[in-house]
Amino acid sequence: MAESTRIPSPSSSGGTSGERTKKSWWPFAFLASVLPVVVGVLVYQLDSFDPAPYPAHELTQKKPLIVPKSNPRMLKGAGIIGVGKLLGPEDIAYDPKSGVIYTGCEDGWINDSAADSIVADWINTGGRPLGVVCGHHS
């Protein structure tokens, strides 16, 4: 049984008829903390882990795919911009409205270059820009 403590009622002058009983809270707290743990252990131990077999025969029957080391058509029609003028370009963004290419460099500058291959410093971020994106609000 729960341990109880008798507290005399303020209206009573020490008689036993006016006393009330205050029950202890620790059995409820103990059950509220232990019961979910016990239920969780019972539920998770009933479900056993059964892995699927490894399909080694499926992986070894097919011939391996041979990928070419380079694509000779990758830069077909591309032009080189800013050779020797850009210090470690890391990211680019193209603004189709103005026709300008923005490039973030490792020295902190975001450079812009128009179609005529002139590279100009646009803004300095004070450190490496982590990405360049043209927003919708030009």
Image: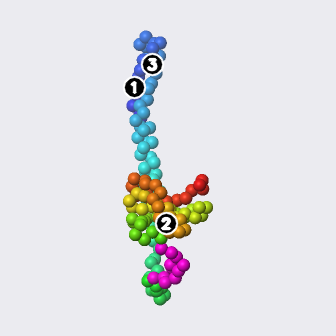
Percent position (x, y) of residue 104?
A: 45, 61
Q: How far apart are marks 1 and 3 (CA)?
A: 10 Å
| Frontmost residue, 26 versus 113 | 113
* Residue in the image at 48% along x and 73% along y: 80
**Secondary element type, mark 1:** strand
**Residue 4 within the magenta-colored segment of the rendering:** no
Q: Name the residue tied to disc 1.
A: 5
Residue 118: mark: 2
* Number of other residues with Cα within 10 Å of mark 1, as a class: few under 14, some 14 to 19, many 20 or more: few
Q: Distance between the residues labelled 3 and 2?
A: 95 Å
* Number of other residues with Cα within 10 Å of mark 2, as a class: few under 14, some 14 to 19, many 20 or more: few
Q: Which quadrant is the N terminus positioned in?
A: top left
**Secondary element type, mark 2:** loop
| Frontmost residue, 137 versus 2 | 137
Q: Is the magenta stretch mostly helix, strand or loop?
A: loop
Q: Which of marks 1 and 3 is nearer the N terminus?
A: 1
| Frontmost residue, 93 versus 97 | 97
Q: Which of marks 1 and 2 is nearer the N terminus?
A: 1
**What are the residue bounds of the magenta stretch?**
70-80
| Above or below: residue 23 compared with residue 101 | above
Q: Name the residue tied to disc 3.
A: 19
| Above or below: residue 126 compared with residue 71 | above
